[in-house]
Amino acid sequence: MGARVTFVPDGKSIEVRPGTTILDASRKVRVQIRTRCGGKAACLMCKVRVADPAGLAPMNQNERLKLGGLEEQGYRLACQAKVVGHVIAELPEDPLKAAVRKQLERQQEEEGI
């Protein structure tokens, strides 16, 4: 069985060579993962949540230090996490979309009161 990444909520999936990073896989299938450092584990913008880390190579020391405990909640850096099996990568909501969604929810609550 080859390496495969499925991106949620996009629903896109791609077969990749074992050792390919989640970030590289996302670019091949045109799934947007935000990054500012170009994949050097410096900006921490490319965090993704992985429910089952069995499809990923073990975390390197640099990634572990950068995440500072977030890995316990299932987070990995897409630029560092190397795919070795099947992985489902949950992408975080875009910050602008999240802000708009929260504002709309707040308005709905206020109107409902």
Image (cartoon, helix red, strand yellow):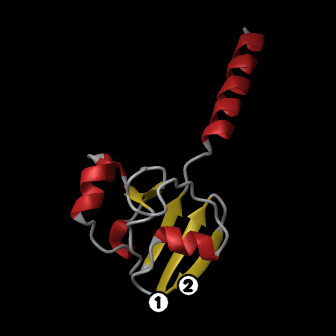
Q: Is residue 21 left or right of residue 112?
A: left
Residue 18 x %, y %: 41, 85
Q: Which residue is mark 1?
A: 2
Depicted 40 relative to depicted 106: above or below: below
Q: Residue at x 59, y 79 (%)?
A: 14
User: Which residue is pictured at 39% across the width and 74% down the height?
Assistant: 82
Quadrant assignment, res 8:
bottom right
> Crowding near pointer 1: few (<14 within 10 Å), some, many (20+)?
few
Specify the amino acid type for callout 1.
Gly
Kindly tell me whether residue 72 is visible in this rendering.
no
Q: Is residue 89 above or below residue 106?
A: below
Across and down, in percent, residue 25 comes to 54, 74
Extreme residue toward the right, this view: 111
- Residue 24: percent from left, percent from top: 52, 73
In the rendered view, tell whether residue 59 sits above or below residue 110: below
- Residue that label 2 marks: 15
Mark 1 or mark 2, earlier in chain: 1
The residue under label 2 is which amino acid type?
Answer: Glu
Q: Residues within 10 Å of mark 2 (few under 14, many from 20)?
A: some
The one nearer the camera, 55 or 17, is 17
Q: Quadrant of the N terminus?
A: bottom left
In the visual, does 86 lie left or right of 25? left
How far separated are the C-alphas under marks 1 and 2? 7 Å
Q: How many numbered callouts?
A: 2
User: Residue at the spot x=69%, y=32% of the render?
Assistant: 101
Residue 27 position within the rendered picture, expressed as x and y whole percent measured from the top left: 60, 71
Judge whether residue 47 can be spotted in this image: yes
